[in-house]
Amino acid sequence: MLIFYLSLIDNEDDRSKFEIIYYEYRERMFSAAFDVVKNNEDAEDAVHNAFVGIANNMKSIGDAVSQRTLSYVIKAAKNAAINIYNKNNKITTVEYTDNVHISDDDFFSKIFDKEDYNEVVNAISKLKDIYKFPMYYYFICDMKTKEIASLLNISTSAVKVRIHRGKKDLLKMLGESNDDE
């Protein structure tokens, strides 16, 4: 299967990096996926889907063996497993848009006027998974919505909606934590 994934990658350095990632993290990715879907076949499918997404987004990965890469690949496996779980259980996501838009510049100015970077990252980690992962990939990993959509196996518009809602929830969360002090 490794040969298939490597065929998706054009750059030789990225192929080498992917091979390291594959051997270093595949068992942990399987375990993370299994925790969600609770069966071997679906967990294997989830890991496969995650590796396809990772292979298509190698430019987003710095060091092959790092805490950031571990976090990235585990989240990719979990998200792929959640997608399979939802599909198997016929859970559909209804996309919703509203007219209120928070630009990234306004969002950052509101947040960083009150909080420091570590507090914001910590707050993002406390969001619901549906918002946490797109927010993390977009703001912390500096990925584009198209890359996130590919990684999470959802549409680009779904990524944008989740980031939009995540921003609202994050602003509420940080606003509430400041009111309590």
Image (cartoon, rainbow, N blue to C red):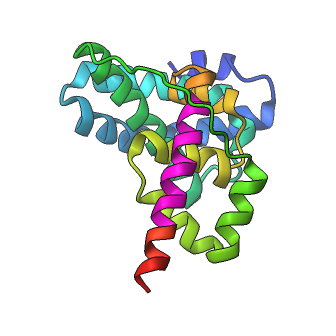
Residue drawn 38% across the image and 37% down it: 78
Q: Whole-percent x and y of residue 101?
A: 67, 40
Q: Is any atom of residue 24 visible in this view?
A: no
* 168 drawn magenta: yes
Lateral position of residue 145 relative to residue 52, left or right: right
Q: Nearer the viewer, residue 106 or 87?
A: 106
Lateral position of residue 30 relative to residue 59, left or right: left
Q: Whole-percent x and y of residue 127?
A: 42, 53
The quarter holding residue 56 reads top right
* 22 drawn magenta: no
Q: Whole-percent x and y of residue 17?
A: 68, 41
Residue drawn 45% across the image and 78% down it: 179
State the extent of the magenta-drawn residues as a range: 159-174
Residue drawn 31% across the image and 15% down it: 87
Identity of the residue furthest to the bottom in this view: 181
Q: Nearer the viewer, residue 157 or 6?
A: 157
What kind of secondary structure does the magenta stretch mostly adopt? helix
Identity of the residue furthest to the left in this view: 38
| For residue 120, above or below residue 39 | below
Q: Nearer the viewer, residue 63 or 36?
A: 36
Residue drawn 34% across the image and 35% down it: 30
The quarter holding residue 157 reads top right
Viewport quadrant of the C terminus: bottom left
The quarter holding residue 116 reads bottom right
**Exactly how many numbered labels are in the figure?**
0
Lateral position of residue 45 relative to residue 131, left or right: left
Q: Whole-percent x and y of residue 58?
A: 70, 35
Lateral position of residue 107 relative to residue 39, left or right: right
Q: Is any atom of residue 100 visible in this view?
A: yes
| For residue 66, above or below residue 96 | below
